[in-house]
Image: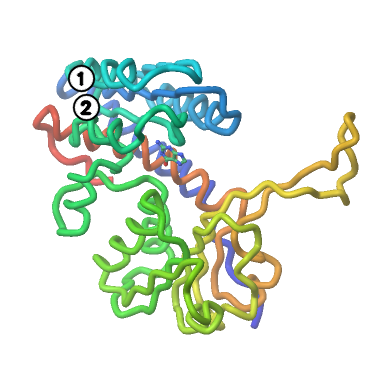
């Protein structure tokens, strides 16, 4: 089989952000409302700081208002809940995102449940989870939503296809399965205890890898011609790139899929970086615009 088609998530995300910006302009001119997104970060996790910075920057680039709230690692739950209550009641805030993970002293589920479901642009509130599984108007978690958009753009109709989702997290695996089921796929949710994972994977027309284990899914797990969506973002040592000034090896990003092996068998595959990653923030911006329209009685943006 020839090398797989590379699904360019970076380019697709740029187009989606342009569409969001067009909608923001329309909303402003038709209603005078500027969509606003509040992002909350607790602690100093370097990756979370990068994500939150990128979210704020891209929010502003799309013409929306960005509200950033940063707290130190020792912040207590009551302080966070008080902020969420304030944001829930602030009409300038259409979307609220609390960056995960939170420090141990804070009950994550309690915080997520405190967010107004109509402002829950992450789609993590149980009300939105329920709406997603029952076919209601939910706000859908950004990463799986981005995967579903890429799949539908590349494959068209997904109906009847065998799909496997490897990973059962609340953020990616479970909502991904719900989205594929809604597209009438036959869905297998696989995880660390799954028996004969390679064999089950080989039956799938669509593979979504979201396990957080570098290069776990091998080329010979892939059915020839299948579409492979790699959600993993893993940093591994890359001694072939040389050493840093402190003597530690340089690093590189890899997905949950052995890209070189899978690309020889698959029909199409997302790269890491530049595949699913950029779609997450683009879908967050899209969700914020959708939430803004719903809160203000405006027509659905259709993006
Ligand atoms: N941490 C890792 N991924 C996510 C995400 O999609 N949303 C939030 N809020 N935190 C995360």
Q: SS class of the residue under badge 2?
A: helix
Left or right of 115? Residue 68 is: right
Q: Quadrant of residue 178?
A: bottom left
Task: State yes or no: discs 2 and 1 in contact (Cβ < 8 Å).
Answer: yes
Q: Name which quarter of the figure residue 93 lies in.
A: top left
| Residue assigned mark 2 | 27
First along the sequence among labels 2 and 1: 2
Rendered position, 207 above or below 23: below
Q: Which residue is mark 1?
A: 33
Q: Quadrant of the N terminus?
A: bottom right
At x 61%, y 64%, the residue is 257
Q: Real-space Cα distance between discs 2 and 1?
A: 6 Å
Q: Point out the quarter of the image occupied by ligand 1.
A: top left
The location of residue 276, given as percent across then percent down, is 50, 51
Q: Quadrant of the C terminus?
A: top left
Q: How many marks?
A: 2
Q: Residues within 10 Å of mark 2 (few under 14, many from 20)?
A: many
**x, y percentage for residue 145?**
35, 52
Q: Residue at x 89, y 39 (%)?
A: 243
The residue located at (51%, 55%) in the rendering is 231
Report x, y in % for residue 203: 47, 84
Q: Position of residue 5 (x, y in %)?
A: 58, 68
Q: Is residue 251 above or below residue 92?
A: below
Q: Which mark is residue 128?
A: none
Q: Is residue 259 shown left or right of residue 119?
A: right
């Amino acid at each position: 089989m020839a090398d797989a088609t590379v699904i360019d998530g970076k380019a697709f995300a740029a187009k989606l952000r342009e569409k969001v910006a067009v909608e923001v302009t329309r909303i402003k001119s038709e209603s005078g409302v500027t969509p606003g997104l509040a992002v909350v970060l607790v602690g100093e996790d370097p990756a979370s700081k990068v994500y939150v910075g990128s979210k704020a920057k891209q929010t502003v680039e799309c013409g929306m208002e960005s509200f950033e709230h940063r707290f130190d690692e020792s912040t207590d739950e009551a302080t966070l809940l008080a902020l969420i209550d304030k944001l829930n009641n602030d009409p300038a805030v259409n979307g609220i995102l609390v960056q995960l993970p939170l420090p141990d002293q804070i009950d994550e589920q309690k915080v997520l449940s405190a967010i107004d479901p109509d402002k829950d642009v992450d789609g993590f509130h149980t009300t939105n989870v329920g709406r997603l599984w029952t076919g209601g108007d939910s706000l859908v978690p950004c990463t799986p939503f981005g995967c579903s958009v890429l799949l539908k753009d590349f494959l068209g109709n997904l109906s009847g296809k065998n799909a496997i989702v490897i990973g059962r997290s609340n953020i990616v695996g479970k909502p991904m399965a719900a989205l594929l089921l809604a597209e009438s796929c036959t869905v297998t949710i696989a995880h660390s205890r799954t028996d004969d994972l390679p064999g089950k994977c080989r039956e799938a027309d669509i593979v979504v890898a979201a396990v957080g284990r570098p290069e776990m899914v091998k080329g010979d797990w892939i059915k020839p011609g299948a579409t492979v969506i790699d959600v993993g973002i893993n940093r591994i040592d890359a001694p072939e790139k040389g050493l840093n000034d402190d003597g530690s090896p340089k690093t590189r990003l890899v997905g949950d899929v052995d890209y070189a092996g899978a690309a020889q068998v698959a029909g199409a595959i997302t790269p890491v970086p530049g595949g699913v990653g950029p779609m997450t923030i683009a879908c967050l911006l899209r969700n914020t615009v959708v939430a803004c329209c719903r809160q203000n009685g405006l027509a659905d943006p259709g993006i």
